[in-house]
Amino acid sequence: MTKKKTASRSDELIEELLEVYGSSPEAVLGEKGLLMDLKKRIVEKALAGELTHHLGYPAGEKPEGVENHRNGYSSKRLLVEDGVMEIEVPRDRAGSFEPVLVPKGRSRFEGFDERIIAMYGRGMTVREIQGFLKEQYRVEVSADFISTVTDSVIEEVTEWQNRPLDGMYPVVFFDALRVKIRDEGTVKNKAVYLALGVASDGRRDVLGIWIEQNEGAKFWLKVMNELRNRGVEDILIAVVDGLKGFPEAITTVFPLARVQTCIVHLTRLSLSFCGWRDRKQVAEALRAIYRAETAEAAEARLSEFEEGPWGEKFPMIAPIWRRNWEQVIPFYAYPPEIRKMIYTTNAIESLHMQLRKVLKNRGHFPNDEAATKLIYLALRNITQKWKNPPVTWRSAANQFAIQFGQRFMPQLAEA
């Protein structure tokens, strides 16, 4: 039969079915509507076909010498994407039939779990998911059921957290957001650290998630060793937020890495000492420091700030810059293309903003695993859009090639 004749016959069948069922939304899309009925019949037909293949002979026939045969049906209630579907599953007398389409013990059809995981990953709470399923599909599910479904991604999280990484990253941003997690009977404010890497072609990738209550040199050394064990051989610039022990941990594992204190974090920390009335003017004074042409000029402007009226009014700001100065001054050796990339940290700031939207509905998580699960699912949704490098990457790549030579372009060493 030609495609044209098949399409014509299909149209005729659809028209006949619509005459029987009607064309209202409920008649077509409802729980007992046309689409659900068709799905039910197709599933039952497919299961009947599976049993025929298993027995080796069609219904209505029973070859001599064959002991096993059909043995009626059993009812099964399936949760599907658009509601609840009652189906009749064929049985065999020997009980050896194992359906593939709807395996024994399974009460959810393909697509239903993915729908729950998608809602969970977009920040809906368990209670909100329960309400949505009941309202939209008239399906009541327990909190334990939803937890079981979402727990199915734990293996995927483990695989993702241990996947191989690139050998070199021009820039890696290490930053944290605070999340409330229950630990040893009390709710604690833990830091969830993310490593956002910029690859040699400009594409962004979240390299991993780490949760730790007390960050220190041992914790950071563990993170760096994990990155190295997953294939990272070199980091050109590591941008950090000034945590104690972090620069030393990075250079222990990646001795050639240039550690750069995040200018945005340093500025925010400085402004936290100011009242709202003074913040704008103090920010302008600090901007003169980090926009200086050279490290020498920046240090001179820091001294001017320290000895001027703002330094006298807020004497704690200048010492913060001086304590971090060794990790600030690498900034001044870079051209504008690289400075802009490591100063603005737009990528990780935007990432954190999107994560906070997902996390804001959570009072606290029952454990680290639950927090990791949700953050991973949120990251999976967010990073799906990260397909192309920024339009400014080409000019930045040229500057990386000049600044770092064969470390940025290792293929030159093989030429």
Image (cartoon, rainbow, N blue to C red):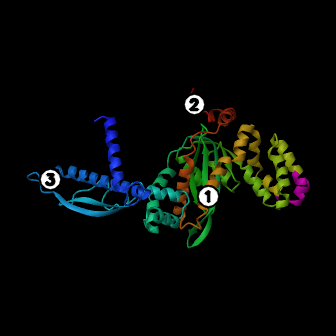
Check the image and name the residue furthest to the top.
Answer: 415
Residue appearing at x 81%, y 48% in the figure:
287
Residue bearing the label numbered 2: 411
Q: Amino acid at mark 1?
A: Lys
In this rendering, the answer to whether 151 lies above or below 162 is below
For the residues labelled 2 and 3, say whether their Cβ atoms are less than 8 Å apart.
Answer: no
Q: Where are the magenta residues, as a range? A: 305-316
In this rendering, the answer to whether 12 lies above or below 114 is above
Disc ID at residue 357:
1
Question: Does the stretch in magenta take in 307?
Answer: yes
Which circle's residue, 2 or 3, is located before the other in the chain?
3
Q: CA distance from mark 2 to mark 3?
A: 69 Å
Main secondary structure found in the magenta portion: helix
Residue 216 visible in image: no
Question: Does the stretch in magenta take in 48?
Answer: no
Closer to the camera: disc 2 or disc 1? 1
Q: Is 297 situated left or right of 166 in this image? A: right
